[in-house]
Amino acid sequence: YRFSLAGTTIPSITEQPVKSLGKLFDSSLKDTASIQRTSKELGGWLRCVDRSGLPGRFKAWIYQHSILPRILWPLLVYAVPMTTVEVMERKISSYLRRWLGLPRSLSSAALYGSSNILQLPFSGLTEEFMVTRTREALQYRESRDGKVASAGIQVKTGRKWRADEALEVAESRLRQKVLVGSIASGRAGIGYFPSTRVDKAQGKQRQRLIQEEVRAGVEEERASRMVGMGQQGAWTKWENVLQRKITWPNIWRADSLNIRFLVQAVYDVLPTPSNLHVWGKAETPSCTQCPGRGSLEHLLSSCPKALGEGRYRWRHDQVLKAVAESIAKAINTTKGHSKPKTIRFHRAGEKPTIPAGGRLGLLTTATDWQLEVDLGKQLKIPSRITSTRLQPDMIIVSDSTKQLIILELTVPWEERMEEANERKRAKYQELVEEPTVNPWRWDAEDLQGGPSA
């Protein structure tokens, strides 16, 4: 029997597939052909963007804001196994590396990691797939419709990864956090980072916590892979190095070559002599300037010839100049702000009202700051303050309030930042702890900037 509408015969599913909510149903009633078609469509989109002639960063933006949201819906409505999603992500990663000018050896954990020392604004397809399917399983199980909640609907994602198991693991981790309570994160005190307990969360807030825990599990796997990489994961050993997050505005404003160099330097995949030797592009791994091994650490901080020729000193002075310009601008800003003469009290439990302009810090305590920098001449602490042979990189002096701020700049290799900080602080420790008969107040700070990050 054939159905017809207004004289037009409706084709059967064997003659013409039916599409509902983006899902295609054919005579086989299986998703195999649709999954293969989705994979081919993804490859076609990537090739189309690749051949568009746009700059690489524009191509990467199209992936993040157009291709990724578009591909997630077919991955939601079809029973796509995890292995297929991983193949898709590898294909995406290869195009992203090409568009950003990065080497093929760069790990995908460097592209999508959210806890890396350098974070890029890209989302991994595998992570988004896992979060999406976990959210689907959670919606089925906690549906307001009792029949849906009790139906025991299974979210099919293959044998390698199961959404129901991931949901149980995430809930178990959250329950464990409730039992453990507040813990210290990094060097911050207990309670510095507020968190919501899952046992007190309901509705969308609870779903958000579970999804964040799934993401945390994925990020832990990435971090464990990075720790196992002796070269690209060397940043995991860096201490006192601030995380840096590259946003899309940063990418638009910066030169693409600068972004490329930054990523390659942090993950040690620059074409150094040692890397070129490993890649089969050079016969020896030796430095071109000295007999040492030409690693990134050697070139940026340990080459004796570069040190003798003043290259490291030139880099130090360029960073010092940029810091001095920023401080000089801040000093000029504080000259137009008068010191607050009244104290604004607030009741217990209320947040204090911050005056217009925000907190300007130590520079607001005086209006006659004088900045002196060790550029082009040897800088010495004025004799009217104290007698010393120490030569800091920068001093800020206020005669009216008798304050002296000493700034010392260091550009060490990232793994040696803690050591450099202790060395610089010990250098001025005796000066800062000078007897109180001296009416001047001291403050010595060490500014650090890594040569790669």
Image (tube, rainbow, N blue to C red):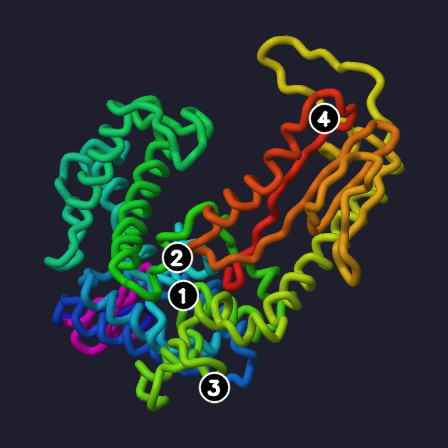
Could you say which quadrant of the image residue 284 lies in? Answer: bottom left
For badge 4, the amino acid type reads: Ile
Kind of element beneath mark 1:
loop
Residue under label 2, please give it. Answer: 235
The mark nearer the N terminus, 2 or 1, is 2
Asked whether 302 or 121 is in front, the reply is 302
Residue under label 3, please give it. Answer: 51
Q: Residues within 10 Å of mark 1 (few under 14, many from 20)?
A: many
Q: CA distance from mark 4 to mark 2?
A: 38 Å
Tell me where the magenta segment starts and ends, as one range: 8-27
**Mark 3 or 4: the one toward you:** 4
Kind of element beneath mark 2:
helix
**Mark 2 or 3: the one toward you:** 2
For badge 3, the amino acid type reads: Arg
- Residue drawn where x is 68% and y is 23% of the image: 435
Q: CA distance from mark 3 to mark 4?
A: 52 Å
Instruction: Mark 4 and mark 2 in contact? Answer it, CB < 8 Å.
Output: no
